[in-house]
Amino acid sequence: MKFIDTHAHIYDLTLPLVVENAQRNDIQKIYMPNIEEETIERMMDVAGDYPCCLPMMGIHPCHIRKDFTKQLYIVEEWLDKGGFIAVGEIGIDLYHDTALLEAQQEAFSIQLSLAKRYHLPVSIHCRNAFKEVINLLEIEQDGSLKGVIHCFTGDLREAEKCIALDFSLGVGGIITIPKSGLAETISAIDLKHLVLETDSPYLAPSPFRGKRNEPSYLRYIAEALATIKEVSLTEVASITTQNAEAIFEAKR
Ligand SMILES: [Zn+2]
């Protein structure tokens, strides 16, 4: 079996321990979304040390400042050097703060354009901002945008909207929490639209709720998904890995 953790900030975890744990649990690749300017160096160090850890480039919506043009200039410089599997993580987050909505929207749309220019997929962060995110995706989708709505927690109608726009859904630890209702939504979605992720060090799945998350826990998410979809763990591994590689690693 071979799994891919499509969203893990492992540069904030204890290395090499978490990479070894991941590999012992068949998590063969870990995609690393960037957060802000300050995390780039750490992430690139991890990418250099561990070939199974593949970096993305972008600024997280919670770290977008008023003067985001400077931030995005740095992103562009790095993208220009090459070696990234995606633009991420990018998006809109209105959970913590709505004051910078306009800046977040503009930065998101510029980073979507960068993804198109560099022929890269995107890893999208969307929190309390479904309408705003879909709005921009509808504007920017010209048939060439591809990617994942990371840590998807919406309802069925929202899931179908993302899929109609050619985006896949990132299934994370929330799927292991019965009262989230996510299992019910995901049970109605074809496996071909799903990829797995931990969002380490956040959002640990049951039975590790509240603990520091790490890629090896992806197994618990995969097992929950297998139960929900009434398929074997091997099938979840093979289909979600194939999906992830088609989105992030196919030559475009
Ligand atoms: Zn993240």
Image (cartoon, rainbow, N blue to C red):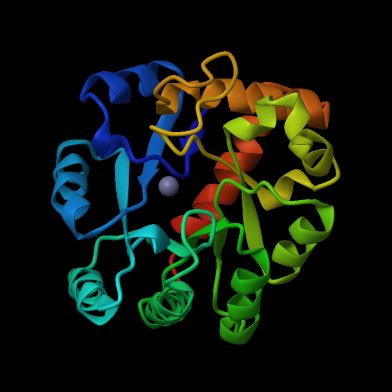
Image-based side of 246 in relation to 167, left or right: left
Q: Residue at x 64, y 51 (%)?
A: 169
- The quarter of the displayed image where residue 164 is located: bottom right
**Quadrant of the rendering where the C terminus is positioned:** bottom left
Compared with 162, 100 (above or below) is below
Horizontally, is 245 left or right of 111 in the view? Answer: right
Q: Position of residue 10 (x, y in %)?
A: 31, 35
Residue at 35 percent of width and 17 percent of height: 21
Rendered position, 94 above or below 55: below
Q: Identify which residue is drawn at 48% across, 73% down.
A: 101
Numbered circles on residues, count: 0
Asked if one can make out residue 231 in the rendered structure from this viewpoint, the answer is no
User: Which percent across, then down, holds residue 54?
Assistant: 31, 47
From the top left corner, tell me how far across and down residue 18 is, in percent.
31, 23
Horizontal relation, residue 182 to residue 215: left or right: right
Give the quarter of the image for residue 144: bottom right
Judging depth in this view, the residue of 204 and 87 nearest the camera is 204
Figure quadrant of residue 114: bottom left
Specify whether 51 is left or right of 154.
left
Q: Is residue 188 visible?
A: yes
Q: Quadrant of the N terminus?
A: top right
User: Relative to residue 131, is residue 203 depicted above or below?
Assistant: above
Which residue sits at x=55%, y=22%? 219
Q: Position of residue 205 (x, y in %)?
A: 56, 24
